[in-house]
Image: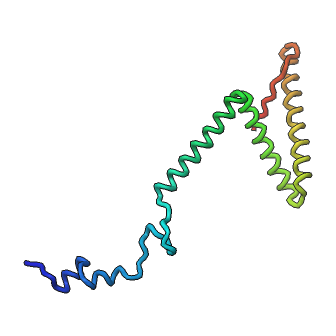
Amino acid sequence: MQVDKSSLATSLFGAGPAGALGQVGKIDSAKSAEGSKAPSAADIAARKAEVTRQNQRAILDQIRDKGIYAWAQEQKLEKLKEKIRAQVMEANPDADPATIENEVARQVQEAMKEALKAESDAAAKRGEAPRPMIIDISV
């Protein structure tokens, strides 16, 4: 069978005017309605990867500056503050931010005192002499 420029062949293969009519009014998937190029999925993924790399570099810089133990303790303290802040805001959603921060600071101090007291009591039970204490507040 020989295919020539019949209307059937042009409509099937889109080579003639019938094929061009099918494209009228379509917007290219990579372009927005204004005609500017929308970012592709690869571009979005590359940007996300770069942001992730920058965040990781920032964290590593903090660890180098403070030391791993101090950085970890700071992270634990921040998590504790977030947890207490959420509890305070849940208990009193209409409170002003200054009141909330004061309550958070008060509760963090209480938690630190309790941790120090528990550590000194444990040392006393073991018969050990008082020593410098490291605060480890696990969340």
* Placement of 71 over or under 49, stated as above or below: above
Who's the residue at 83% across and 22% down the image? 133
Q: Nearer the viewer, residue 85 or 53?
A: 53
Image position, residue 96 (x, y; %): 90, 57
Identified at 87% across, 22% down, the residue is: 120
When the figure is inspected, residue 86 is found, relative to residue 132, above or below; the finding is below
- Does residue 84 appear to the left or right of 30 in the view shown? right
Q: Position of residue 8 (x, y in %)?
A: 19, 84
- Judge left or right: residue 8 versus residue 139: left
Residue shown at 43% from the left, 69% from the top: 29
Figure colour scheme: rainbow
Residue at 71% across, 32% down = 72
Q: Nearer the viewer, residue 116 or 17?
A: 17
**Residue 132, quarter of picture:** top right
Residue 7 shown left or right of residue 138 in the figure: left
Residue 119, position as x, y percentages in the image: 84, 24
Q: Quadrant of the C terminus?
A: top right
Give the image location of residue 22, x and y in percent: 33, 82
User: Which quadrant is the N terminus positioned in?
Assistant: bottom left
**Total marks placed:** 0
